[in-house]
Image (tube, grey):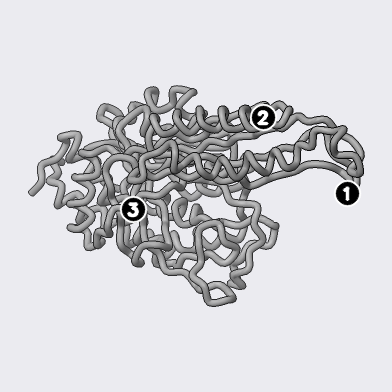
Amino acid sequence: MGWSAAALLEALNTALEAQLAAAVDLRHRLHRNPCVSGQEEAAAALLAAELGMAVQPVAGTGFIARTGPGDCPVVGIRAELDALPVHETTGVPWAAVNGAMHACGHDVHQAALVAFTRAAAGLRLPAAVAAIAQPREEGPPSGASDIVDEGVLESAGIEAVLAVHVHPGLPAGAVSIGSGAVNAAYDEFEITVHGRGGHSAYPHTAIDPVPIAARITLALYDLVRSSVSPVEPAVLGVGQLAAGSAANVIPDSAVLRGTVRTMTGAAQDRMHKGLREAARHIARASGARATVSITRGEPVLVNDDALARHAAYWLERAGLPLAEPLRSCGSDDFSFFTQRIPGLMAFLGVDSSAAADGSPPTLHSSSFLPADAAVEHAARAMAAMYVGAVRKLGLVGEA
């Protein structure tokens, strides 16, 4: 059948109606039984069973399931399989009790992807759908990077890749579609200050690495101001500072670990250079030596302009209001996909119960629990984004 985009969107949304009750039940089952990064076998098996179609294993514990004609372009839609090592405090009957938790909404994403894929499977599609159940988004090694390195995107013929991520900072049911950079590159660093240990009563006979590490820590927080334009987002944080084993011993070394988040490659390079120079010069000035290790993580997540433009139009046609474009220094390994092919990450506003102290819940919080309505909103957003993608690919007309 020769679809118009409007007719395709209507057909997808009608087909979704029959999937929503089962999708909410699936969301509860996924939430009750979370799997941490690298141990997603049970979640993958449950999703594959719910999809009821052949799957291609990818990246160890993930898979791709394809539906639609075999001789047409393919639109990929990703959902993350993994949960976080967080003890849940929501108190709902379907709360997790195994020491892990879907504290970032991945259970919503998975249930929505199943609902959308099952709805799409009953239609004669203008572009095939590849449901990507991706492992290891929350912890290294990145599942998305492995999928890219395995050549799966090319072998599956995927020409555009989409994702929806819940976000408590947006109005419930509203969708943020921004073009360009929407999430930051994420890198980790480790600095070891090598001094000379000794007795705390005789500091003049030692080179104490602890105050040197403290000075380096304070200096690093000035790097954003001195290295990056004030109108360009960048964040540096030291999360660990460790030294010594006894109160009366000057240790031989001190270690500090932290993260750098930047929105452009140029800022990333300047921050890395400044970090190395600050550590080495401050240590040398005190007679010590610093070694610096920087591990690059996810790159900047860049949304394709044309995909964003088309998706925004069809999201509004689907009755999902558009929020102001959200850009944050959070990171997501979906960026490995968008480095390779045109991609689009949408952020979906959700309601969630307040924390015990009355504060609004945040992603990765033990009290973060999107309302079940988020499953429907996410699935309908996927449908609208799929229609936008096939419009961008020139496979359907508009009217």
Q: Residue furthest front?
A: 204
Which of the 4 image quadrants contains residue 22? bottom left
- In this view of the protein, can residue 52 be seen by the observer? no
**Which residue is drawn at the image coordinates 52% and 39% (left, top)?**
260
Per the image, the residue denoted by label 3 is 326
**Image height of 124 relative to 24, above or below:** above
For label 1, the residue is 247
Q: Is residue 16 left or right of residue 299?
A: left
Residue in view at x 84 percent, y 33 percent:
206
Frontmost residue, 84 versus 268: 268
The circle on residue 285 is 2
Q: CA distance from mark 3 to mark 2?
A: 43 Å
User: Which one is earlier in the sequence, the residue at label 1 or at label 2?
Assistant: 1
Q: Nearer the viewer, residue 76 or 296?
A: 296
**In front: 244, or 264?**
244
User: In front: mark 3 or mark 2?
Assistant: 2
At label 3, the amino acid type is Leu
Gap in angstroms between the C-alphas marked 1 and 2:
25 Å
Residue 244 in view: yes
The residue carrying pointer 1 sits among few (fewer than 14), some (14 to 19) or many (20 or more) residues within 10 Å by Cα, namely few
* Residue contact between numbered discs 3 and 2, judged by CB atoms under 8 Å: no
**Residue 363 picture location, percent across and down:** 51, 58
Query: Which residue is depicted at the point 75% across and 41% down?
Result: 210
| Image quadrant containing the N terminus | top left
Q: Amino acid at mark 2?
A: Ala
- Quadrant of the rendered structure where residue 161 is? top left
Q: Nearer the viewer, mark 1 or mark 2?
A: 2
Where's residue 34, x and y in %?
Answer: 61, 54
User: On screen, 214 above or below 165?
Assistant: above
In the structure shown, which secondary structural element does the residue marked by tag 1 occupy? loop
